[in-house]
Amino acid sequence: MMLLSYVVFLPLVGAATVTIVGKIKEDEKLIGAISSAFLFSTLGLAIYNLYRIILIQGGKPMTLLLMGTPNAACFVADGLSGLMSIIFSLISSVASLYSIGYLREVNATRITQYYVALQVLTTALNGIAYAGDLFTLFIFTELCLLSAVTLVVFYRYKESVEASIKYLIMGSVGAACILMAVALIYGVTGTFNIAMATSILRSMPQNPTTILIFGLLLVGFGVEAAIVPLHSWLIDAHPAAPFPIHGFLSGSVIKSGVYAFLRTGYFFFASGSTGWPSDIQTLLFIIAIATVTLPNLIALRQTDVKRLLAYSSIYNIGVIMAGIAVGTPFGLAAAIFHIINHAVVKAGAMMTAGDFYVRAHTRNLLELKGIARKMPVSGSLFSLNSLSLSGLPPLNVFYSKFLVILACLLSGTMFGLFTGITLLVNAVISIGYYVAILVRYTWMHEEAEKVKHVNKEAPMTMIIGLAILAAVLIALSIAPFFFFDFISKIVDSFVNIDAYIKAVLGKNC
């Protein structure tokens, strides 16, 4: 059981180690290597943890009591939390490795602070994944916000300072909503424990208090997930961050908001057999439609590669929310499959754009014409990720988008049908702007002025990190239904809420 705490807290040991080494000598390569070693070790532990849950525990949740009373803080690991921990740890590990070359190329300072914040953010994300009670979930959500803001403001330019303040304000409002929801849940149930609270809330009829709890959870975690209309912070914060951090934020941090909402909202208010109540399902479908459509249309007008990819991230959150809105095991499995696919591919796309930035020193697509021809390795990786993000077959994102659309069309509701059609239309729109990036800009024969002097590839650590993500992308593309079947089994266990309650409370957590 102690393995759960190792996955969460090992990055904190890494943060302490990086701090000590940085005090002695701020050697960017050494500090980056230490950070990467700790994070890849965390990834290894996360993979082994999921192996234990699935193959040794037979899918039965593992629990770890952090304090000495039944209502105290605890970690709970089931298949879904284990899978999310792997995604969080994978993206953070690659971001750390990538940063070794990236920070050197952009002549960054405060290297120690950067890697410490990255390690702490990884701890926060894994803590969110494994939190078995609302108090622990809130603490790690706050830690996630603070460490993410630290990384957004890293450059300390006017753009990054303004973006971080906006992120902090909106994130604090979201945190206040979560805290109020936690207080209400404790007042109603007398417990912070998610399993215990679930067993009580599910037996209660819908009333103004439970409706308020749901609304507060949706808004609180919706800010972190950047659902429309709570998304505006992301458009400024993500582009202001360094490229590897933008990839990490898009690939992992906003997914933590989706996961936390799914873990609490679905457990408290949905049923594994019937899904969401009809009024909640309708609301979630409306949110999904807005979150898919608005940013997708705005993305068509962007020339800043980071802002374009930021809007694309919101659009893909909408796709995920559509699968969650369906509420069936099939819909949830499709949504989680898209979480994984988008995390890997968006991190890869953003970091590959960072390759272009360190050589051409621009984010403007008009000034990146022909860059892929001058950097063929980075250009090929960028093309691979962009084509996948566009949803073109046979790459991995196509399959998860298709499955989410299918789940909506099969939902048996008018809103589900309309959402499925909306997703189809927006999928075509997304193909338009990704193909525009590839054809009109990066592979053009005409070279922009800032591209003409480019004569070498990005540093090797950056390429290696991207190659790891590309390998995962290819694996997901070659065997999509193998992975979807695996995810479906995890979801089948997740929606068996009674078994979760029995397993957790049986351990006196």
Image (cartoon, helix red, strand yellow):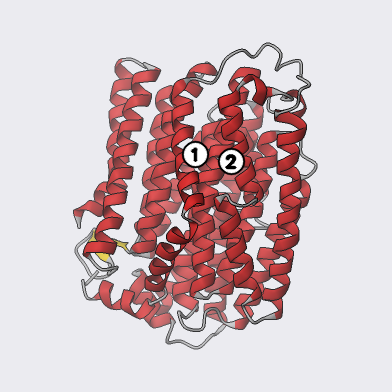
* Residue 68 visible in the displayed image: yes
Q: What secondary structure is marked by label 1?
A: helix
Quote the CA–CA distance across marks 1 and 2.
Answer: 8 Å
- Asked if the residues shown at circle 1 and circle 2 are in contact, with their CB atoms under 8 angstroms apart, the answer is yes
**x then y, percent, for residue 476:** 48, 51
Q: Which disc, if any, is residue 470?
A: 1
Q: Does residue 175 appear in this view?
A: no
Q: Where is residue 345? Give x, y as percent.
A: 54, 44
Tell me residue 285's x, y (percent): 66, 70
Query: Which quadrant holds residue 468?
Result: top left
Badge 1 local density, few (<14 within 10 Å), some, or many (20+)?
Answer: many
Left or right: 187 in relation to 250: left
Image position of 364 with respect to 149: above or below = above
Of residues 40 and 283, the one drawn nearer to the viewer in this rendering: 40
Q: Position of residue 67 (x, y in %)?
A: 22, 60
Q: How crowded is mark 2: few (under 14 residues within 10 Å), some or many (20 or more)?
A: many
Quadrant in which residue 496 is drawn = bottom left
Q: Residue at x 62, y 54 (%)?
A: 316
Which residue shows up at 72% across the image and 23% down it? 370
Mark 2 or mark 1, which is nearer the start of the sequence?
A: 2
Q: What element carries label 2?
A: helix
Residue in front for this viewpoint, 147 or 183: 147
Find disc 2 in the rendering and name its residue: 385
Q: What residue type is labelled 2?
A: Asn
Q: Quadrant of the N terminus?
A: bottom left
Task: Indicate the amino acid at tag 1.
Answer: Ala
